[in-house]
Image (spheres, rainbow, N blue to C red):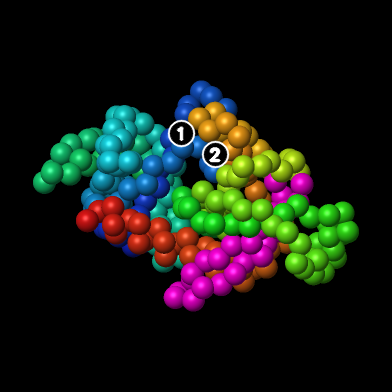
Amino acid sequence: MSGLLSKYVMPGGEVELKAIERGRKQADARERKSHRSQVLGVLSEDRVEIAMPIEEGKLILLPMDGEYDVYFYGDNVVYQCNARVVDRYKHNGRYVLVMDLTSNLRNYQRREYYRFSCALEMDSRQLGEEEEISIAAQEELLPGLPLKSSVIVDISGGGLRFVAYYAYEVNSLILCKYHLTVEGREKEYRLVGKVLAVNELSHKPGVFDHRVQYVNVDPQDREEIIQYIFDEARKTHRKTVR
């Protein structure tokens, strides 16, 4: 195998698992259900111990021989490989997965698509036709127009997902305004996004889930958002494993 596992993957590091379903059309990695957990140990260059995921206080029993896309998160870097569950057991009160790598470990470049679940207040509005032309020309938007309230439920360097008591049209461009604290400093972000999908929540009639992709995002803003996500993910992980 790659010989990179012990060099780049450390015990205590965060790991994300996304199931590979053989014999079916594979969904986009961003759309598949993911489980987050912790690396417990590196047993060899192609075998790793991972804590069995726990979600909402419940143990998630991943199946034997289950195959997964595995993402190991470091300091502002992600390494990806495929792996298979080869053993499961309980040790010192913890449930452990043993996984064998079935592909080489590689530097995963698309960090911006790592989604972080959250609950952040956001204001937004749909852009007018003139503003859409301004976006294409990389000009400023009209200031001071009324905004609608919503809540971001997950965020990435490539876009976000939010819920609201109203629905935008698919393919419309919207202004998204929210605040993030990055490295101890709060900053307001005013980003334009394209609405990719809108769905009414089955368990909450009148509440609409929106999936948005950023448009012409400033590279510095994207890096700051990614930095925020990595910092908050580490904080969440430390609370989970205590």
Mark 2 is surrounded, within 10 Å at the Cα level, by few (under 14), some (14 to 19) or many (20 or more) other residues, namely few
Residues in magenta, as a range: 172-195
Residue sitting nearer the eye, 112 or 206: 206
Task: Measure the alpha-carbon separation of dots 2 and 1.
Answer: 12 Å
The residue depicted at 56 percent of the width and 72 percent of the height is 187
Q: Name the side, left or right, on which 161 lies relative to 75.
A: right
Q: Position of residue 165 (x, y in %)?
A: 62, 42
Question: Outermost residue toward the top?
Answer: 23
What numbered label is drawn on residue 31? Answer: 2
Query: For mark 1, what is the residue?
Result: 20
In the image, taking residue 171 as reference, residue 205 lies left or right, namely left
Q: Is residue 233 above or below residue 23?
A: below
Taken as a whole, is the magenta stretch helix, strand or loop?
strand
Residue 5 appears in the figure: no
Percent position of residue 223, x then y: 56, 67
Q: Quadrant of the C terminus?
A: bottom left
Q: Residue at x 72, y 50 (%)?
A: 194
Proximity of marks 2 and 1: CB atoms separated by less than 8 Å: no
Pick the front one: 147 or 183: 147
